[in-house]
Amino acid sequence: MRTRFIAALLVVVAMVAAACTTESTSDTAGSPSTTESSEAAGTDGQAQVSGFEVKEVAVGDRALLLAIADSPTLRAQGLMGVTDLGELDGMLFYWRHEASGGFWMKDTLIPLDIVWFDVDGNFVGRASMLPCSADPCETYSPGLDIDYRLAVEANPGDLDWISEDTVVVYSD
């Protein structure tokens, strides 16, 4: 009788352990971390930008969920190789100093809209950018001799609501 009790107890423990494992796996798949690989997470936007911090950023009267590109390495990587932004609203490019020049779409797989903002977070320009796989790629900028501090990239049309009065509030 004691052997049957122990066997039954082991079966119950095994079933509980299996249920906990399944539940844990489901939770992880439902809300992947930013360190999860893109192969493991399919088309989840956060997984495709692993290595980037993801934050809510105030853009005008909205809070956008953006991957943050705030170092030379992260800004150079940008959204190259990303096929789907998933739950992300886009990517914020941030410089701790005034920046100028343009963006290009080398090895970027999806079309993107971009909006630039100055040191005070004020709108300074926008563009719609197309993927490019071969040199030379077109360069997109807010205009000649216009400095900026921030840029937001998103799916085409997702930033159409941004106007010249829109202000970004971000600090690192």
Image (cartoon, helix red, strand yellow):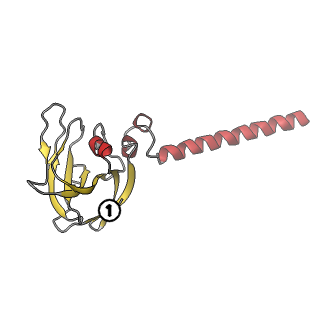
Relative to 102, is 41 above or below? above
In this rendering, position of residue 23 left or right of residue 85: right
Question: Where's the N terminus, which quadrant?
Answer: top right
Residue at the right extreme of this rendering = 1
- For the question of whether residue 46 can be seen, the reply is yes
Q: Position of residue 78 (x, y in %)?
A: 28, 44
Please, what secondary structure does the residue beneath circle 1 have? Answer: loop
Quadrant location of residue 119? bottom left
Residue at position x 88%, y 33% in the image: 3
Quadrant location of residue 104? top left
Quadrant location of residue 61? bottom left
Residue at the top extreme of this rendering = 134
In this rendering, position of residue 125 left or right of residue 36: left
Question: Where's the C terminus, which quadrant?
Answer: bottom left
- For the question of whether residue 159 can be seen, the reply is no
145 or 128, nearer to the observer: 145
Badge 1 local density, few (<14 within 10 Å), some, or many (20+)?
Answer: some
Residue at position x 34%, y 60% in the image: 57
How many marks the image carries: the answer is 1
Relative to 170, is 82 above or below? above
155 or 142, nearer to the observer: 142
Residue at the left extreme of this rendering = 144
Type of residue at label 1?
Answer: Tyr
Q: Position of residue 39 (x, y in %)?
A: 41, 34
Q: Position of residue 25 (x, y in %)?
A: 55, 41
Task: Name the residue that disc number 1 marks.
Answer: 170
Residue at position x 71%, y 37% in the image: 14
Residue at the front extreme of this rendering = 97
Residue at position x 20%, y 65% in the image: 122
Q: Position of residue 151 (x, y in %)?
A: 23, 54
